[in-house]
Image: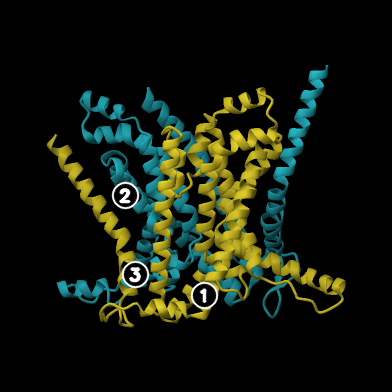
Chain colours: A yellow, B cyan
Amino acid sequence: MRLERWGERLTRLYTILVFAFLFLPIIIVVVYSFNAGRHVTELLGFSTKWYGEAWSDRFLIEALKHSLTIATITAILATVLGTASALAMDRLGSRVRWLFELLTYVAIIVPGIVIGIATLIFIVTALDWLNPWIAYLTSSRGPEIGLGLGSVIAAHTLFTMAIVNVLVRTRMRGMDRTLIEASEDLFATPWRTFVQVTFPQLLPAIVAGGLLAFTFSFDDFIIAFFTAGQDQTVPIYLFASIRRGVSPEVNAIATVLLTVTIVAMVVAGLVYRRGQRRSGGAADRAGDTAVAGVPLAPAPQTADGSS
Amino acid sequence: MATAGRARNGRSARRGTAVLLALPTALWYLLFLVAPLVVLVVMSVGERSPNGGYAPGFTFTQYAALPTRFTPLVNTLGLAALNTTICAIVAFPVAYTLALKVRGTWKLVLVALVVVPFWTSFLIRTYAWMTLLGGNGIPRILGWIGFGDIQLLNTPFAVSLGIVYNYLPLMVLPIYVSLERLDKSFMEASRDLGAGPIATLRQIVLPLAAPGILSGIVLVFIPVMGEYLIPILLGGGKTYFLGNALADLFLQSRNWPFGSALAAVFVAGMIVLVAGYLALSRRLVRAGREQSLI
């Protein structure tokens, strides 16, 4: 008994230490974003001047616009394509489904750096072949297609839609089939069954998948590094400025992004709890982790499904 | 007859909708996954043109030259395995406390707090560690206590720390979820039957947490294998990962065929590794479940 109590105290202390470890760098960033001094060594008192400088940095604002555009379009595409393919896989023949599953897992497993490189050489090769044709067909020196936001979106959508697909299919497996059958027995059209029965049940997974796609896309450095061409995104801008020797501006941007994230999480949490109360508190774990924003890896699900 | 006909019609209509729903995704996979990987493989059997880039050809010289990149390969595999293990060891007690020792609003807040760092920019977090580990950070404080002249930044230690720090949430959450589902009466039964805390942990908690630990390992191991930023920013480019070798080959020395060969082997290796791991873990989880429930 005594041993147990000591063990409990130790794990509790340990947990507090791990949380301190997790938040130490973040606290440092926030503190230095309000520091008047330019260098980390000089704590000169409170100032918000770095926020002003960040706001008037043309390159940074440009990068922010690019990042927001890429992440928004990626999130929409990934959610639509991932959900549509998840719904389709249920009805496809087993061989086609197997192929789809394989491609989905390959898209998730292939490291980001390889996706970036492969997309780069593919697009460069394809454009070498395509651009003369476009020039020929438009019979003018029209705008050449090159690397840019479009290629980043293409590569980001590839692996984020695979993640949405896995999340939605996991959710479908835990779904109550009898409701769909009841709806069909009551002569609802397939579309109506989807809108009124299937979609509301899949919604938490779809929302979680969309949020994840947005975050991954917004935070991705390595794929954009290879495929963005001349266009800068926030992570590319940050990488360049870290290598140049960083300006405290960076801390200000980080603090703003952090604040936005926390506010969004609190709002999402409140909305989720309200939705839960309305549905009679039928909490499901998939939804819980979905709000936490991390996909459950395919591993345990496939393990469950096959046994 | 009529009903059979209608059923068949309904089925083929369903097939039609399914194909329509799957088509855009299939095209996307074809255009941005299959085609790029095919180009990668084609390029890997090509030759390097004199001014860098690619010249058509069919040769395996690139693959024959792969052993020259043996060090980053071993580095990546070894460090990814080591750091994933450290991550799991660090994360388990945290997940355990969150799932079984904290209740109510506190639990929600703490779980959300685990995720907050994950939602802040990867680059910013890593940059913050550069500040902390650099000459004016922790080494200076250590100097005051009397441990002078310790270099932390640009060491393998800094790389490990960066990896564990950045990927910890991805390990804590799946373990938390699997422990959260754990039926607490098992633990009470174990205690009532006279098992000590360590026996309960080994025979009840760990087997039931196994699926969570396994998915955490996959979630951490895959991105760590492709890591590029942490070795550059925290390791000072001294700890060389496959990702860094690839980036150098494509961006600096512009040896695209050789880079493609390395990337192709990397992808093939990843797929074999993950597939083998999933098959193994499936068997382990099933065995564990049977054992723990009987």
Of labels 3 and 1, earlier in sequence is 3
The amino acid at mark 3 is Val
Residue placed most toward the observer, B127 or A208? A208
Badge 2 is on which residue? B110
Q: Is residue A93 above or below residue B223?
A: above
Q: Look at 25% across and 79% down and name the residue there.
A: A45
Q: Are marks 3 and 1 on the same chain?
A: yes
Q: Is residue A21 left or right of residue A133?
A: left
> Which numbered tag is attached to residue B213?
none
Q: Quadrant of the N terminus of chain B?
A: top right
Residue A131 percent coordinates (x, y): 79, 72
User: Marks 3 and 1, Cα distance to the nearest angstrom?
Assistant: 20 Å
Tell me if mark 1 has few (under 14), some (14-19) or many (20+) residues whose alpha carbon lies within 10 angstroms of its own. some
Residue B181 percent coordinates (x, y): 38, 34
> Which numbered tag is attached to residue A61?
1
Badge 3 is on which residue? A29
| Residue B247 seen in the current view | yes
